Image (cartoon, coloured by chain):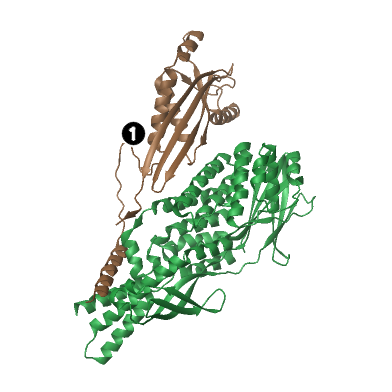
Amino acid sequence: MSKILRLFVLMAAMAALVACSSGGKKVTRIESDSVTDLSGKWNDTDSRLVAEEMIQDCIARPWYNKLLNTKNGELPTVVIGSVRNKSHEHINVETFIKDMERALINSGKVDFVANAEERGELRAELASQSGNATEETRKEAGQEIGADLMLTGSLNSIVDQEGGEQVVFYQIDLQLVDIQTHKTVWIGDKKIKKYMSRSSVKM
Amino acid sequence: MKIRFSLLVLCSFFVLACSNKSMVRYEELSKPLQKEGFSGAIHKVQEKKDDLYGDNTKFLYHFDLATLYHYNGDFKKSADEFEKAKQVYEDLYTKSVTNEAASVVTNDNVRPYRARPFEVLAIYEMNIVNYLAMKDIDGALVESRAADIALQALYQKDNKKTNDAGYLRYLIALVYEMEGERDNAAIAYYKTAKAYDEEGTKLPAEAQAFIVNTLEKEGRSDDVKNLKLPNSNVSMALPNAAEAAQGEIVMIGYAGHSAILGEWMLSGTYVRGGILNVMGKNPQTGRVQSLTIPFPATALGSHGGTTVSVTIAVPERKDVPYRVDNFEILVDEKRHAVRPEVYLDNTEHLKKNLEDERATTLGRTAVRVLTRTIAAQQAKKAMETNNIFLNLLTSIGTDVAAGQLEQADLRVALFLPHVVRVARVPAQPGAHTVKVLATDRNGSAVKSYTYTVNVKAGGKAVVVVPAIQ
């Protein structure tokens, strides 16, 4: 057999191999708090770790004890406002907000009230109760606890890339503002830098 | 005997495995599109996913589906499908050696489809509009930033074949303007004018008015002087009216159906001296054209000097029928009809892409066909017996198998509009009725659309008109 014929048969065999290969799916359960990085994009691990670290930093700062003294030991009440996604990825900000809410509540150092959207739903329920629930079980309107502080923030990113290499820098900025005085009592940021590389060829 | 058997099995395998799905995709999908509209086409794409697209064309499956959802007003579903298309595109950054080798013996259809540059840009162009239509400015901003990164990546990958994208830059400027980021909007406007110049496309007069107006007001008069602006004496009346009205209605109209790809079969000979001469009827022009491809004799080793008959298949633009060419817009039936300008011509982008790729495609095709043809001749010799009848059968079988393998890669987005037309109509805050009349080349009415939009103070309401008929 000539060289060309041999080469042709070899390449044809490779083609058959490619055509006949079938991908199998394998599912493995892993811990929800385990660190996973598949695509390099913002993921659940980033959301959880950033929320925990920033909330811990927030409540460990001097404003906390000052406010506690002003309120005669009564826990400050916090509401979470908007956290804007100003990055280059569609990030589910809801999960990040929920992670922060959980970190705040679990700290035991602040009281926490429902956000604007949830309050709307609760008020609708309250209005519904006033006409439908029994007098003994009916909840009264005007008994909400007003928050002392509002937590807001934004998520930014910078991308640098060349060929198969990419560096993504995320910066998460949060600020806590006194609702009465509009005074900013705390500003925190968290930076994450990820390096990703891809090979241009594979077998 | 063993060689004969393996070759026979391989030939049968290829004949079965390599049917060209691209040849039938448009025919299969255009019927439900015409009869049942976008919903019918969406259903058909999903139903025939494996038959019409398959594993190697995942990008186009998600892209076509996203485009149809976009036209159908299912903006969230469209955005989701565009995300999947983006993911496929990213995953295909790494090229498989085995796939590339396989394409040398069969055809380019066995390679995963990696998207043409204008399709990558179309993802962002349509997705920005998706988010604007959903009134999700944050989402549109995310797409704008991602589009900038995608453009950089395209430049780095192949800067000779990539131009900046004027229409995409203009959309980004609109998004920044809606967000109130005037400085970023000014930069994006500046880049818009530069991009149209780089693309070799005339900057629409309306866009020029908004660009100059914004740059002047942001203290960037020097930038205006640096730009090559094609329209002389452009009036600032429209941007001034938009500012005075404290709002705008932005009509984004998709007019007509972009060209797709057809197969151009060329036959000829590889002659001594390393030249491949082929000729065939161009499906687009209808004329018989010939191509001469320099092909070094050394590329085929010891067989370089032989003369062989070959047939090659290359992709060529194929126009598809459509009726809508332009629009007439009436807001609240109070004003004169506005006729929007062309901001993007997808057929021109496809033509440019084919020109850019022509040399590479022809080179690959020539190598493939010549290698295969000479290999087929060798195979015939190896399989020769004393039985003339059997030899004839083997010869015919080998030629048929080799002929079946030759298929052009016709994969391209099927539902892009021929042109995108944009018009910005000043509108005061409040509810407005927008009537859009889609017209043909002669100005005759084809279809009318009516929308009720709510313009917020200082805002822009986006109206999407999907007239790709």
Where does label 1 land, which residue? A33
Residue at 42% x, 39% y is A168
Q: Which chain is brown in the picture?
A: A
Residue at 73% x, 52% y is B232
Q: Which chain is green in the picture?
A: B
Residue A187 % position (x, y) = 49, 22
Residue B251 % position (x, y) = 67, 51
- Which residue type carries mark 1? Asp
Residue B185 % position (x, y) = 62, 41
Identify whether A60 is placed above or below B439. above
Residue at 31% x, 75% y is B12
Task: Report in which chain the residue with disc 1 lies.
Answer: A
Picture quadrant of residue B163: bottom right
Identify whether B389 is placed above or below B99. below
Q: Under tag 1, what secondary structure?
A: loop
Please rate how many residues cluster around mark 1, counting C-alpha atoms within 10 Å: few if below 14, some from 14 to 19, many from 20.
few
Q: Looking at the image, which is closer to me, B322 or B319? A: B319
